[in-house]
Amino acid sequence: MIKTDVLIIGAGAAGMMCAIEAGKRGRKVLVIDHAKKLAEKIRISGGGRCNFTNMDIQPKNYISQNPHFCKSALKRYTNWDFISLISEYGITYHERDHGQLFCDDSAQQIIDMLRRECEKAGAQIKLETKVEGVTKRENGFLIMTHETEIECQHLVIATGGLSIPKIGASNFGLKQAEVMGLNVIHPRPALVPFTFDHDTRTKLDGFQGIALEAEISCHKTTFREALLFTHKGISGPAVLQISSYWNPGDEVSINLLPQLDLFDALKKAKETNPKQEAKTLLATHLPKRLAQRMAENADCLGKLAELSDKKLKTLADAINHWTLIPSGTEGYRTAEVMSGGVDTNELSSKTFEAKKVPGLYFIGEVIDVTGHLGGYNFQWAWASGYCAGQFV
């Protein structure tokens, strides 16, 4: 039998941050994880350089059924607090588009820093430990693992979401919440590429690998970032961002030339250069392969003088107002995060303790708080872990 003040299940970003803070307060802390390696999601993130936070962290960059829940934690542990921590360790970083911050060297530096901070705080980490049962007791919890029993006063679940199952993602946290009587908002893949049906893929065959800046909208939300055509559909930052707002059956609107009113440009060119072909004009603004196929699909091959305004409008709409209903997404296999999770109404936004189950805490991705692409989800992990660590 192992006895500890605080048991944290999940040795990822949120779990280690919570362990550090609880350990600093003199709490006896044990962190367990079923994985063989520490913090795999940190290691593979950002192409191995970890997009660890963003220069501009705002509550509006987070999606939740309760949009106010994240405000307190983000205010109490800011991006600048984490930047200060990595600076103490001499970890250099750089800023990319939209305020995204990445390590200059390697994501492993972040993992090593967190491990060192846990050691300094006296928090122990035990990997390759599978939880087989959790029992609520009068003054705490009893956790059965494949090797031993662990008794703790406070139990923190920081097991993440369902995204990227190849590195060990599971529904453990969601199942435990339900067993303890907490409501769970239906989970689904987020920050994930869209897939198309066979007919749409056939129309777009040959576009694979083409990337361009585009504007993509769903409902009343719009993002303008890079879009990439894939063998299965579309990807790229713009698509990943809007996927968090998309539900099956929803229509998506895409503007492949957000900087240009194409119909206006085509009409002017028809007057000033009538012998020019539509595809030639398009190719001055779009990749040549894309321009050719779009002209073909709209039956706009030939000189501008020979094309009616109606046909030009059809072509322009296909590019400035391309609407479609994705057949689905690539799922958790390639999703950056999970949307949905433990209902925030079940938790204290100050302590992250379950209102119905004293001593039980949920932090990080397992909660129904999903950040935009760009370091926001890591900042949520740091902030939620930090805040819970002040109370466990």
Image (spheres, rainbow, N blue to C red):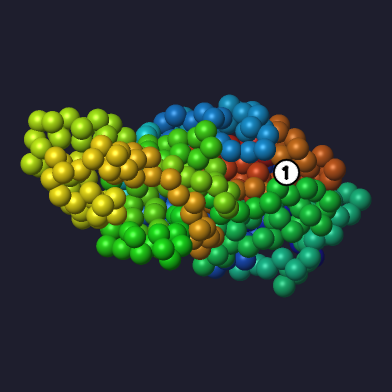
Residue type of the residue flagged with mark 1: Asp
Determine the residue positioned at 35% across, 64% down: 202
Q: Secondary structure at mark 1?
A: loop
Residue 247 position within the rendered picture, expressed as x and y whole percent measured from the top left: 58, 49
For the residue pair 53 and 270, the one nearer the viewer reads as: 270
Determine the residue positioned at 76% across, 53% down: 177
Q: Residues within 10 Å of mark 1 (few under 14, many from 20)?
A: many
Q: Is residue 125 above or below residue 280?
A: below
Q: Quadrant of residue 346?
A: top right
Residue that mark 1 sits on: 343
Determine the residue positioned at 49% across, 31% down: 57
Q: Is residue 309 above or below residue 39?
A: above
Residue located farthest toward the right when viewing the structure as drawn: 138
Quadrant occupied by the N terminus: bottom right
Can you see residue 56? yes
For the residue pair 240 and 367, the one nearer the viewer reads as: 240
Quadrant occupied by the C terminus: top right
Please indicate whether residue 97 sits to the left or right of residue 169 in the image.
left
Can you see residue 28? no
Residue 218 position within the rendered picture, expressed as x and y whole percent measured from the top left: 50, 40
Residue 157 position within the rendered picture, expressed as x and y whole percent measured from the top left: 69, 52
For the residue pair 304 and 369, the one nearer the viewer reads as: 304
Determine the residue positioned at 79% across, 65% down: 133
Residue 210 position within the rendered picture, expressed as x and y whole percent measured from the top left: 27, 54
Please indicate whether residue 252 sits to the left or right of residue 145 in the image.
left
